[in-house]
Structures are given as structure tokens and as C-alpha cells.
Image (spheres, rainbow, N blue to C red):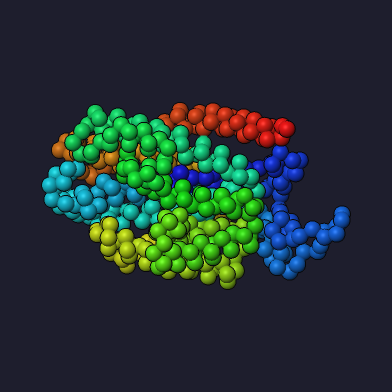
Amino acid sequence: MSMQGADSGPPTGGRLVGGMQKVIPSPRQPLPAATTEQSPGPAGTTQKPTRASAKHAAIPGRGNSRLYAIDGLRLLAALFVAFHHYAGTARVNAPDNAIWGRSVSEIMPNWFRFSAYGWIGVEIFFVISGFVICMSCWGRTPRQFFTSRVIRLYPAYWFGIVFTSAALIAMPGVWERGRAREVLLNFTMLQSGSRVGNVDGVYWTLWSEMRFYLLFMVLVVTGLTYRKVVVFCCVWGAASMLAPAAGFAPATLIINPEGSWYFIAGLALYLMHRFGQDLLLWGILGLSWMMGQLEIGHRIDHIEHVSSWRGSVLIFTVFLLFMVGVALGYTDRIRWKWLVTAGAMTYPFYLMHYFVGTTIINRLRDTMDARLLVLSVIAGFLVLSWLVHKYVEAPLARLMKRGLDTSFARLRNASSTP
């Protein structure tokens, strides 16, 4: 989940690669064409950039500044998902459901019609994740990529597991609590691969994100360039169509065809942002939209059952068009500092809001107006998310980064010792 997020802007400053004194140019300086397609010439010289390399050189000023609009989109997507879970799922609309006691479409029909489309926030998260992961990893080493993902994903996630488990023990009756062995395995974030249930239902998206990171790590190891990312998008897209058709389960598991096209759309949008638009990138984005709308239809038919295909595709299309505007720089004037905080709160909010929030609604549903209750629960989780980010996530991430940096330095030194 870009919900898990990368920063909306890459770090600055030169870096050491593999322990050797090779410094990657700071993203604050326009990268020359040689960083994308140019190859070295005879000793001490460099070949002149080809027309293709000049065309695909990074656009000065692109890819090097924080995109505040994406921070805002993250929070909006998380809120959209929360409204769906509280007032728009087939579960809460069932008669005698454990959360509201009766169909939510009877309690607040207008809110139900709006919230029924909130599940699309997850697809929005995946597109944003493809965009910001590519942005934040450009010029990074595999070690830096690994460290950044670990310290970004795990601190808030670990707190979310403890928080949700404790809440379900204190307030039983709405959701079934997992066994201790299953809860412990959840701390690895690998429970889906072991066929173990999630402590909170929203954790299923982390499994899609993890598979994306593993695939993208292969690209990071070789060094990101325009050409390599385009080829990666094309190969991943082809595999997403062929593996399920061939019935090859291991490949399908790794390739993740249910989510791949959303991540591919995000990657293509970032290439537009960094290098400018061209027909090939528009083709990748268009194909991602076509495959995405098909996947949206499948999810409506087999999982959600509460929203129409036309309305869902319309929302997804408007979002993609807005992301095109972000990629092409039309939102660069949006620089509201509070959006940075909003983006930072998104991941803890997403992790904590579902099981505990619906359990709170169950306990308080007869004490106030249903709409006020939903808004109050969301507001409470926003405050809690800010506190978790400030006092749990950020400090623990700093400690983990220092520990991982020390561990990798020790590993590098050990490997160089005869």
C-alpha cells in the first residue's frame, strides 16, 4: 500500500554504491542522458548521446521534489476505504449483521450508496504505490531499497497487530480472534504465504505489496533506467495474462495478476513524470486501464456485490486522469505542508481502522446518530494514527535504520575479510 508508502519525494545527496567510491548524482541536479541510455566509449571518453537517449533523459526539475498532491490522495483513499468498511460493505448491509444490527442501507441509505464504492481506494493505493516506489528507489542501491521498505512497513504494522489483538480480547463478539500462533506469525507479514489468517482483514493488501517489492527488487539490483522500467512493465504485464491462462499456480502466485496492472499503471505514470510522456507510456497506461476495469468487474461480481461496474470504473478513470495531471506537473503548485502529515498518518490509519472501528460501532450504535458515529470513529482513528506515527513509527524506524545500517556494514566488512 503506498498506503505502506514510500516518501513522495526521493532523498537527496550522493551515495556510495556497494562500498566503492562511486557517487550517484544527487536527484537535485538534472541527470545527464548517460544515466539512462548512454554507454561509455573508449578509454577516458564518452560516446555522444544518441537521439533516443536525449529523448529519454530526465526532465530537469522532475522526479526530485515532493509531490504533496500524492500525500493528499493517500489520505483520501484511506478515508474512502474506511467509509466503505463502516457503511458500505455487503457485510454491514446484511440483516441482523453483528456491526449495526440491521442493514446499513436502512439506517443511512445515502451514505450506503456513496460508501459502497469505497473499496476502490485499495486499487488507488496500488497505483500510488507503483508511482512512489519507483520514485523513491531511483538511484538507490538494493541495500537502501531493502532498508527503506523494512523501516517503513514494520513499525506501524507491529503496533497495529498489538493494538487490534488487545482490542478484540477486550471487546469480543464481533470478530473472531486468531490463535496465539497465528498472531505471532502475523508479525512476519508473511502469514498469507503460510495460509494463516490476518489479525485484521485489511492486511491482505500487504501480501500484494510484498510481491511487488520482490519483483521490483530484481530491477533495483540492475539499476533503474527508463528502458529497464518500460521492459519490466511489458514483461510483467505479459506474464500477468499468460500465467493464469496456463494454469501455472507458482508463477501466478508470484506475478499477482489481480494487482499487477495497478502497479504497472503507477510505474508508467512515474516515467511520464520523470521523462515526459510518449506514445509507448500512454499505451502501457491505456492497457493497464483496460485490464484494471476487467479486474474491477471481477471484484464486484465475486467479492463486493454492492456497487455497479460503471460507477466503479468511472471513479477509477477520474483518479487515473488526476494522476496523469500529477505526473505531468499540473499539481506542482500544491505545496500545503499539512499534506505531508496527512500522508504520514495514512498507513497507521489503514492498519488500525477496520476490525477495531467496526467493533466500536457495535458497542456505540445505539448511543448516537449513525452518521455522527461513523464520523466520530474516523476522527478518533485519525488522531490515534498521528500519535502512532509520531511516538511509535518514527522513533522505531530510526532505531531500525541504525541497526540495519550497522548490520550491512558488518556484513560488507566480513565479506571483504579473507
Let me know if residue 382 appears in the view. no
Q: Nearer the viewer, residue 2 or 43?
A: 43
Q: What residue is at 51 percent from the left and 49 percent from the top?
A: 213
Q: Quadrant of residue 269?
A: bottom right
Q: Quadrant of residue 364?
A: top left
Q: What residue is at 74 percent from the left and 44 percent from the top?
A: 23
Q: Is residue 212 depicted above or below 179 in this figure?
A: below
Furthest-front residue in this view: 418
Q: Quadrant of the C terminus?
A: top right
Left or right, 181 with reference to 289:
left
Left or right, 402 with reference to 246:
right
Q: What residue is at 46 percent from the left and 34 percent from the top?
A: 155
Q: Residue 79 location in percent, x, y?
A: 36, 47
Q: Residue 218 location in percent, x, y?
A: 58, 52
Q: Residue 387 location in percent, x, y?
A: 42, 31
Left or right, 415 with reference to 229:
right
